[in-house]
Image (spheres, grey):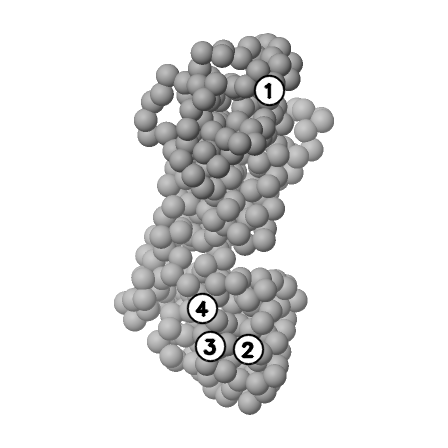
Amino acid sequence: MGELVFLSIPHSLRASLEHKHHHDDELFIIDPAIPIPVDEANIENLSTEALLSGMIRFLMEKTERTSPYTTYYRHFVRAVRPSILAEFTEAAIIKARNADYAMALEIIAALEALFPASEVVLLNKALVLEERAVSLEQSEQNAEAAWDEALEAYEKALAIRPPFPDAFFNAGFFFIKQKNFTQARHCFNEYLAITVKHNDSEDDDELKEKQKRAKASLRKIDKYKLDDALFQEAYNAVRADKAQEALPSIHAFLERNSEVWNGWFLLGWALRKLKRWDDGVASFQKAIELGGDNADTRNELAICLMETQDYTGARKQLEIALRREPENVKIISNLGVLALRRGDDDEATGFFRTVLEIEPDDPMARNYFSHY
């Protein structure tokens, strides 16, 4: 990528663009007195795409500084390519689904430069950052910084005025993943309060479905006492690798809520970190018995079973977990580890190769291939 140079639009291009495009329902008129930024590598073969690319790059690089031409460049790009918001959004989503988060965020950065007041762009950025954090955590990489970036993006989306309903809806599920159930409750309540005036609409099935999901999440938080202060304190301690310190709070929570599977899962998680494998097995089995039958619980149970050398039991749990979440790299990696423990190098290679197909930077899989 070369330097940006500024030049006038050639008459050949100006004629093809003049008076043919609209911006915000108004005819866009090219001002020949305003120079256009172009990558020096494109000077010999100027095209409409080269002009738009140069202006987008300028806007992205100048986001922290004002320019008398910033608004004009935005209008120019949006007039010549009126569908750019939809096109770039779709491209970013596809990149995120393919785990190319760097490129997805680059595309969203371009949209931020073009549509600085767009709540949709801001929310999409938060969603991509959240997806990246989940991916890092599943591959057992350090995801703390990624979660912090996603949180910052959500906080900006939640600060939009007037309030943007979808920001509260998606933030509710983000905070559930963070196990911050107090904030999740607040977001779902705000979403329902904002959208309650639309309850009589017979045509908005999507809205009704979202309201239904928000209410279901609130009922679950209440049922399982997930915003309990003891539970939150214990969860934060275990996550911070202070499992031993968390045990008194976990036991105190379970004394009051012995039928809440989340409490037993949290106990199992703490015991697994403390390498108390047999106790961990019992706790995760109790969590499943009480309703916590999900991929995470099965995976954690499998880890404890593997450490007790119950390889058959561990394999069974991992296969159940994988059926629930076929692309969860943490589960597939553990199947690879289990194959190694059983001395099946060929099967281990297959599992770790699958991991790299889903997550090319997964450290465990890359380490396997570098050593074996």
Q: Position of residue 203 (x, y in %)?
A: 71, 27
Q: CA distance from mark 1 to mark 2?
A: 58 Å
Query: In the image, which is nearer the foreground, mark 4 or mark 3?
Result: 3
Name which residue type carries label 3. Answer: Ser
Asked if labels 3 and 4 touch by Cβ distance under 8 angstroms, the answer is no
Name which residue type carries label 2. Answer: Gly
Q: Which image quadrant is residue 274 in? A: bottom left
Residue at which label 3 appears:
370
Q: Position of residue 287 (x, y in %)?
A: 51, 68
Q: CA distance from mark 4 to mark 2?
A: 13 Å
| Residue furthest out toward the front | 44
Residue at coordinates 41% horizontally, 74% vertically from top-left? 272
Query: Which is nearer the N-term, disc 4 or disc 2?
Result: 2
Q: CA distance from mark 3 to mark 1?
A: 53 Å
Q: CA distance from mark 4 to mark 3?
A: 10 Å
Residue at which label 4 appears:
363
Q: Is residue 348 above or below residue 170?
A: below
Residue at which label 2 appears:
336
Query: In the image, which is nearer the foreground, mark 1 or mark 2?
Result: 1
Q: Which image quadrant is residue 312 in? A: bottom right
Residue at coordinates 57% horizontally, 36% vertically from top-left? 88
Name which residue type carries label 4. Answer: Pro
How many residues crowd mark 3 within 10 Å: few (<14), some (14–19), many (20+)? few
